[in-house]
Image (cartoon, rainbow, N blue to C red):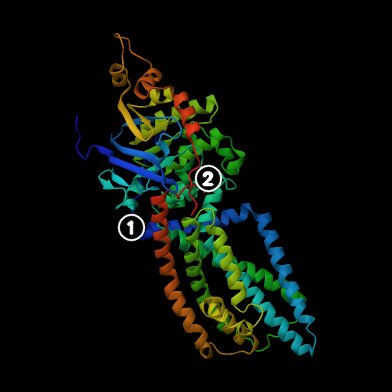
């Protein structure tokens, strides 16, 4: 099935990215990745550490320029029209990017201003959004470093919502959270989908999370998108003897290893990437 | 819960003005949160100024000579404290974000780099003025300075022009941590040290070896100090300082746009090579 540009929130066409590790040694982080997200859709990208998930998110969020291919967000080229596409999106990453000595309120006010939202507009919305994400408003003036990881992720989601993004990039938002906080954040993502006209790209290595939250799931391995479909579609594609596999089994069939094995192999292969000049 | 509101449509210049104010306010928040460290640096700067002042007192000679030398040294100390802080704050723009882990969030936002650098510059100037006033207040309790004929307005005008040049100079230096996350900030620290050496902070630049003197010509601080000393110590008029004003005006016209252009190019390079991330 093909969609018109009007329907597409995000289009990646043959996107490739290679980093130089050492002299004459290169790491191919993305290899000709093509992907489309329709408006309002939530697509999960499953992959072990080092599979290219974070590079994919960095390329979409204009932090890294691809070597080849094209990224379009609501029809706008992410390289040539970076400022336009930046207004459409926001990102929540695995590590909360905050000024840790500053309070939640101070961080939220600053984050909103970067998107052209003034204090008088953001202050009333902060209370409303924090109530919505289940954050105790009495702690709004505490430094971020006093808050738990779960609370910090709620503030990160609140900061993203404050700018009303139509494309949300969630890069392992629940990694490292305790089970309770993880469930809270997942519930929040579901509520955002229900209440907010957002398209979501969720990178994760949590199979259950992907199955629970996403309309479609892609599997990224060594920079290649080896499969993408609905959960049901993936299961049907990889079924054997008429028995539908679990998502873990789908991952094994598509990649030849379990997620844990893929991560272990990646750790063995991993070498520090030389970024300094 | 109703989460969707949509960004208010407003002209680009208004969004940029809000972002500039955001950077100024954020730096104020950070100064407040790191208050004890700010106090430590202020106390250190004051003690440093007093130490240098006492060197002037110990110079001996007539009391008039001693007062003039003391005032000469203290003007250098105060102006350097103000201008070097502007340069340091600007040049640490990228390093700060990296230390705090916010670089990715800031650089993927739609606020322009110009807004970021101008916001940093405005805060640096405001904060530098407050620090300088406090230092001046403490210093005046210890020393009888030779400022009877001082042309204060002219000196302030010279300082204002030099501030613009230094903001631009800092913008140029701010690109270094983008080009090299590991070594960039160290390079800017070396630039600060060289400025201290060649700008005539505590001595006339003509005492420098001949091969170093061309560097003093390139430093905006050299012109600012020369002019400010003439106006504060001898009451010279602003108009008589044209030889110091025109180089500062030219640097003020060249450095800020050059800094913005270099920063843009540095950002593009960092995006191509994957350097735009929280860890080096």
Secondary element type, mark 1: loop
Q: Count every numbered label the image shows and give the total.
A: 2
Element type at mark 2:
loop
Left or right placement of residue A23 versus residue A136 in this view: left
The residue carrying pointer 1 sits among few (fewer than 14), some (14 to 19) or many (20 or more) residues within 10 Å by Cα, namely: few
Which of the two residues, B237 or A52, is positioned nearer the viewer here? A52
Q: Position of residue B62 (x, y in %)?
A: 79, 90
Query: Which residue appears at 39% of the width and 39% of the height?
Result: A29
| Left or right: A226, with B148 as reference point | left
Q: CA distance from mark 2 to mark 1?
A: 28 Å
Can you say which quadrant of the picture contains the N terminus of chain B? top left
Residue B259 in the image, given as x and y percentages of width and height:
44, 66
Question: Residue B244: horizontal and vertical position, in percent?
Answer: 52, 84
User: Do we see residue B126 in this rendering?
Assistant: no
Residue occupying image coordinates x 74% and y 72%:
B50
- Residue A218 to residue B125: above or below: above
B18 horizontally vs B37: left or right: left
Can residue A158 be seen?
Answer: yes
Compared to residue B65, the image places residue A169 above or below, namely above
Q: Is residue A183 above or below residue B175?
A: above
Front label number (2 vs 1): 2
Residue name at image x 46 percent, y 75 percent: B252
Residue under pointer 2: A98
Q: Which residue is mark 1?
A: B11
Q: Position of residue A74 (x, y in %)?
A: 27, 43
Q: Is residue A108 left or right of residue B264?
A: right
**Residues indicated by labels 2 and 1 sit on the same polypeptide chain:** no
- Chain at numbered mark 2: A
């Amino acid at each position: 099935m093909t969609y018109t540009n009007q329907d597409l929130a995000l289009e990646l066409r043959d996107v490739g990215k290679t980093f130089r590790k050492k002299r004459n040694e290169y790491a191919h982080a993305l290899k000709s990745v093509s992907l489309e997200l329709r408006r309002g859709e939530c697509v999960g990208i499953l992959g072990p550490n080092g599979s290219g998930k974070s590079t994919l998110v960095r390329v979409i969020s204009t932090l890294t320029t691809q070597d080849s291919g094209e990224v379009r967000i609501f029809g706008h080229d992410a390289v040539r029209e970076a400022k336009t596409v930046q207004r459409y999106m926001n990102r929540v990453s695995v590590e909360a990017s905050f000024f840790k000595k500053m309070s939640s309120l101070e961080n939220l006010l600053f984050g909103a201003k970067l998107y052209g939202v003034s204090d008088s507009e953001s202050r009333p919305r902060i209370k409303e959004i924090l109530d919505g994400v289940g954050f105790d408003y009495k702690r709004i003036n505490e430094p971020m470093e006093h808050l738990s990881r779960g609370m910090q992720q709620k503030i990160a989601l609140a900061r993203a919502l404050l700018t009303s993004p139509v494309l949300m990039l969630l890069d392992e938002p629940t990694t490292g959270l305790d089970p309770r906080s993880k469930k809270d954040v997942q519930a929040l993502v579901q509520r955002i989908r229900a209440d907010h006209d957002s398209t979501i790209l969720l990178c994760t290595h949590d199979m259950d999370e992907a199955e629970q939250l996403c309309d479609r799931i892609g599997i990224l391995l060594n920079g290649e998108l080896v499969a993408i479909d609905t959960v049901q579609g993936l299961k049907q594609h990889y079924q054997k003897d008429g028995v539908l596999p679990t998502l873990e089994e789908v991952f094994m069939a598509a990649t030849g290893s379990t997620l844990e094995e893929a991560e272990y192999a990646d750790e063995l292969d991993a070498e520090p990437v030389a970024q300094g000049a | 819960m109703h989460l969707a509101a949509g960004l208010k449509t407003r002209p680009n210049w208004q969004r940029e003005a809000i972002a500039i104010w955001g950077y100024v306010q954020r730096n104020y928040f950070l100064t407040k949160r790191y208050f004890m460290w700010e106090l430590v640096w202020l106390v250190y700067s004051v003690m440093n100024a007093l130490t240098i002042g006492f060197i002037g007192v110990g110079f001996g000679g007539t009391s008039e000579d001693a007062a003039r030398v003391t005032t000469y040294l203290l003007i250098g100390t105060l102006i350097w404290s103000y201008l070097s802080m502007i340069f340091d704050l600007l040049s640490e723009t990228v390093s700060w974000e990296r230390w705090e882990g916010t670089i990715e969030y800031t650089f993927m936002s739609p606020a322009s780099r110009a807004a970021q650098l101008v916001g940093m510059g405005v805060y640096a100037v405001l904060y530098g003025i407050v620090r300088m006033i406090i230092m001046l207040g403490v210093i005046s309790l210890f020393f009888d300075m030779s400022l009877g004929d001082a042309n204060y307005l002219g000196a302030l005008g010279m300082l204002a022009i030099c501030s613009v040049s230094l903001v631009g100079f800092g913008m140029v230096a701010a690109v270094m941590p983008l080009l090299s996350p590991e070594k960039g900030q160290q390079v800017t620290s070396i630039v600060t040290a060289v400025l201290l050496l060649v700008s005539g902070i505590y001595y006339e630049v003509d005492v420098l070896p001949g091969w170093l003197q061309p560097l003093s010509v390139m430093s905006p601080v050299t012109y600012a100090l020369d002019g400010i000393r003439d106006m504060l110590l001898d009451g010279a008029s602003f108009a008589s300082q044209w030889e110091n004003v025109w180089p500062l005006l030219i640097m003020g016209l060249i450095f800020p746009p050059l800094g913005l252009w270099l920063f843009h190019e540095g950002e593009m390079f960092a995006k191509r090579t994957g350097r735009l991330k929280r860890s080096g």
